Amino acid sequence: MKPGAARGLHLAVPVFHNDTFEPVVDKRVTEIVRRQFLQADGLTLVNDAGSAPFAVKGRVLGYGLTVLSFRQGSVNELRVTIYVGVKYEETATQKILWQESYSSSAEFFQTSDLAVSRSRQDRATEEACQNIAESIVSRVLETPVGR
């Protein structure tokens, strides 16, 4: 991303909708997307979508676990995959500037300790969310809009 690419951009990122059975994945995705936007030089993140000229709205469409390997008859390595649908819109007119689907995955090793395995799954989920967030922010900053 070019330095200053977001100069003067005011943007809202409401909490993404969760269409999955994975609890709080919507809040996690939203938080990581917002954090990524905060790193953009010159961009102002607005809490109220109604008072921002632009909004990034999204849905977590899917969350899946895939077994990658077994060890001595039990699951050893898994992959977390997240699917997200996003639209970037002008809030005053509700004109959709673009609409895109994103997916990302990350692997983790499971252990016999459920708490450790869940912690590793959460880290893999965050890694996948981070990849999606970087793609969303890049796409927004590449979108020419009259500011």
Image: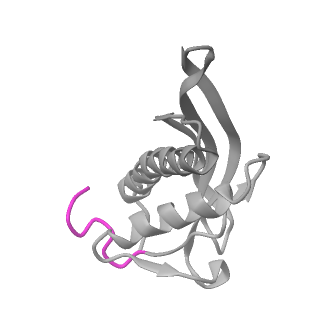
Q: Is residue 44 above or below residue 114?
A: below
Say which residue appears at 54% left-offset and 30% top-offset.
79
Image location (x, y in percent) of residue 124: 49, 44
Which region of the structure is painted magenta? 1-9
Image quarter of the C terminus: bottom left
Asked if 26 appears above or below 82 in the picture, the reply is below
In terms of depth relative to the viewer, which is nearer, 116 or 25? Answer: 116
Q: Residue at x 41, y 55 (%)?
A: 143
The image quadrant of residue 6 is bottom left
The quarter of the displayed image where residue 80 is located: top right
Residue 5 x %, y %: 28, 65
Examine the structure image and report whether residue 6 is included in the region drawn in magenta.
yes
Residue lying at 64% horizontally and 71% vertically, measured from the top left: 91
Q: Is residue 138 left or right of residue 120?
A: left
Q: Looking at the magenta stretch, what is its main secondary structure?
A: loop
Instruction: Give the residue at x 58% y 68%.
Output: 55
